[in-house]
Image (tube, grey):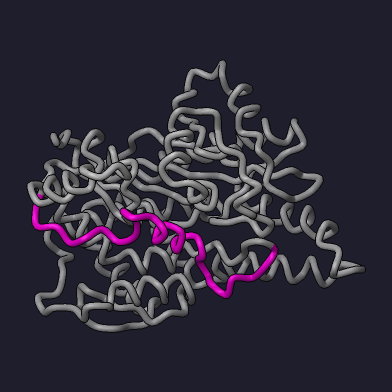
Amino acid sequence: MEFTKSEALTFGLELEFQIVNEATGRLSPSSLAIWNALSEREDLARFSLEATLSTMEINSSVHTSADAMFAQVHALAVHIRQIAKAAGLDIRGGGTQIAQFWNDRVMAPTPRAKELESKFGFLPKRFSTYGMHVHIGMPTGDDAIRVANVLQALSPLLIAMTAASPYLQLSDTGFAAARPLETLMYPHGGPMPELRDWAHFEEVTEELFSTDLASSLKDIYWDVRPKPEFGTVEIRVFDTPLCVKKAVAMAAFSRACASLALHGQLRMASKTQPASAQRVSRFLACKEGMGAVLYNPIAGEWAPARQWMGQIFEMLKHQPTYAVDVSQLKFLENLMREQQDHETMRTAWTEVQANNPNPEDIAWSLPKYSSEICKLLT
């Protein structure tokens, strides 16, 4: 498997957005209508359909600065919101939707969607959640593996920082981020195994491809994975944030962490970590968000998420991309001291329900709640 060389630390962003019906506040299987409205745009490649029809994805081009990425992604999000609202729909962030039921999802009429349903049954509908993916350019395959190992080690913190999926099926899940639990259902999902080098990655993937369940890297739902055709490392563990600006700032944070790893300033602790530490830490990040105590495999110790994050922000100030992305990184550092996305979602629902003349009438609350969340996107 050949790794396509990329310019080191260039980066791109993919954002999966919810399509909701303004009148009902529920997910709407309307991505084909939005896609048709986009068909005349020269930048159609910046938009993508997903496996189910209540999702619209936007993809940035390759960037060297977060400010330029934000200008592009914000404009794309504004445009699809305009198209959606003209049809009585809206676009919003968040990793899950409060009235989300897997058996209500409609698969897209694409070969990929049919292949997924054939392989995995109901799981693609269940996994019809909303995530953010960040791609970071790497010069070689071995560099990609070395950096991917570090980013996988950071993934519990990244989950906590973007936790935005507290609700499913009209219920509070009790989790800050329920969405990252879904990949654990797949045979090749969850944390990327620690890999020695590119040759070891090829050995592992060849073994996975020998089954009928994985025919390409698209079928391997690791939290972090190399993307050889792009020459990148892809981080897949994030919930889609409620606002585009946070999404771009998180992309800048991820790139800065990758820069530290690439230049040897961020590396795994020499001592062996407890066998279950990574899995337990990932679970706690999903459960408690930034209130969690997480295992930091860089330092080889358990620490509060906010303390670990603060240490990384200090390290980021001494790597090459910091000056380029300083406005986005400072925005994120300040934002992380405020109410987090899962807390904002719970607060919004509680406030809407408090004004509901009949709290049992969920149909009254859903459009009002949805409208409040949609306002945060752009």
The stretch drawn in magenta includes residue 195: yes
x, y percent for residue 374: 67, 50
Which residue is pictured at 29% across the width and 83% down the height?
302
Q: Nearer the viewer, residue 364 or 162?
A: 364
Looking at the image, residue 26 sits to the left or right of residue 143; the answer is right
Which residue is pictured at 21% across the width and 81% down the height?
274
Q: Main secondary structure of the magenta part?
A: loop
x, y percent for residue 245: 50, 51
Which residue is pictured at 74% across the width and 71% down the height?
350
x, y percent for residue 341: 56, 64
Q: Nearer the viewer, residue 40 or 361?
A: 361
Which residue is pictured at 58% across the width and 26% down the height?
35
- Residue that lies at the very extreme toward the right in this rendered image: 357
- Screen quadrant of the N terminus: top left
How many numbered marks have been drawn onto this rendered protein structure? 0
Q: Which residues are magenta?
A: 170-197
Q: Is residue 29 above or below residue 281?
A: above
Q: Is residue 190 above or below residue 123?
A: below
Name the quadrant containing residue 170. bottom right
Looking at the image, residue 95 sits to the left or right of residue 85; the answer is left
Q: Is residue 225 above or below residue 55?
A: below
Name the quadrant containing residue 101. bottom right
Looking at the image, residue 125 sits to the left or right of residue 156; the answer is right
